[in-house]
Image (cartoon, rainbow, N blue to C red):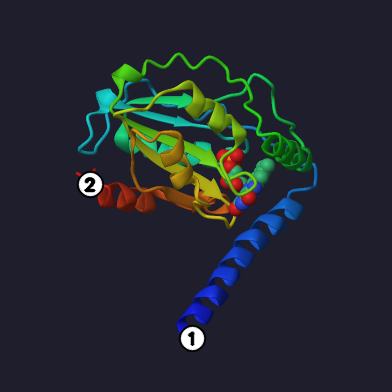
Amino acid sequence: MKNLKTSIIILIFVLLIGGLGFIVVKNLNSDNKSNGVDSNIKNEEGKTGSTTLDSNKVLVIYFSETSNTQKLAKLISDKVGGDFIKIETIQKYPTNYQDLVDYAEEEKNKNARPELKELNIDLDKYDTIFVGYPIWWYQMPMAMYSFFDTYDFSGKTIVPFNTHEGSGVSGTNDDIKKLEPKANVLKSLAIRGGDMEENQIPTVEKWLNELGFGN
Ligand SMILES: Cc1cc2nc3c(=O)[nH]c(=O)nc-3n(C[C@H](O)[C@H](O)[C@H](O)COP(=O)(O)O)c2cc1C
């Protein structure tokens, strides 16, 4: 009974911290700060990696609005090699942060499937697909649902990674398992968006080692 009480208190505490982190960031960023990914962040196609994975069969694909996930995607891509692709919607998202937050909430409430720009992916080429996204309103952005609706990952290995401001993985690894029941979904890497200002290479290397991809 005492253990149950303690567990409930810890759970409430974790949820509060996660929620508060997001609200604080939401307010900090409500000063018309414009978002947008960094067009300088790219990787050469078919890059050779330095892990046990065959780079010819690796894809790192990500969705990012304010470039945190993009930075993480680049770090991962630098290690695992292969192709590097950005997921973009046809309809651009609002550049004002508060407008973006409101717009994304509406998309979530409508269970929308925003149309994506053509990605030209031939999934047959890949065995292992690293899929990255930010947490929006405690789940994946709806554009990621459009992405998983478009492609069938049966028989593929999906390696999710995400950035957030307190919510962590926020159940998204399980959501991907439900969306792609015939894929092998490995352990996620979740990093705070703000922490992408620091050197996250050791964190990425540790995670890749844990997944058995270390060299
Ligand atoms: C629309 C929107 C909703 C968000 N919702 C959450 C949330 O529910 N939980 C959380 O921890 N962070 C939330 N954040 C913060 C982002 O997950 C975080 O800043 C992330 O690093 C952004 O990634 P990006 O720069 O690649 O777009 C939200 C941000 C936006 C713009």
Relative to the observer, which residue lies in front, 89 or 37? 89
In the image, residue 196 sits, relative to residue 35, either above or below, namely: below
Farthest-out residue, front: 1
> Badge 1 is on which residue?
2
Graded by Cα atoms within 10 Å as few (under 14), some (14 to 19) or many (20 or more), the crowding at tag 1 reads: few
- Badge 1 marks a residue whose secondary structure is helix
Q: Position of residue 74 (x, y in %)?
A: 43, 35
At label 2, the amino acid type is Gly
Query: Where residue 212 is drawn, which disc sits there?
Result: 2
Callout 1 touching callout 2 (CB < 8 Å): no
Relative to the observer, which residue lies in front, 6 or 191? 6
The count of marks equals 2
Q: CA distance from mark 1 to mark 2?
A: 38 Å
In the image, residue 164 sits, relative to residue 125, either above or below, namely: below
Q: Position of residue 14 (x, y in %)?
A: 56, 67
Q: Position of residue 80 (x, y in %)?
A: 30, 35
Q: Residue at x 44, y 46 (%)?
A: 174
Q: Is residue 16 left or right of residue 77?
A: right
Disc 1 C-beta below 8 A from ligand 1? no
At label 1, the amino acid type is Lys
The quarter of the displayed image where residue 78 is located: top left
Relative to the observer, which residue lies in front, 2 or 53? 2
> Which one is closest to the eye, mark 1 or mark 2?
1
Graded by Cα atoms within 10 Å as few (under 14), some (14 to 19) or many (20 or more), the crowding at tag 2 reads: few
Q: Is residue 181 left or right of residue 9?
A: left
Disc 2 C-beta below 8 A from ligand 1? no
Q: Residue at x 59, y 30 (%)?
A: 143
Farthest-out residue, bottom: 2
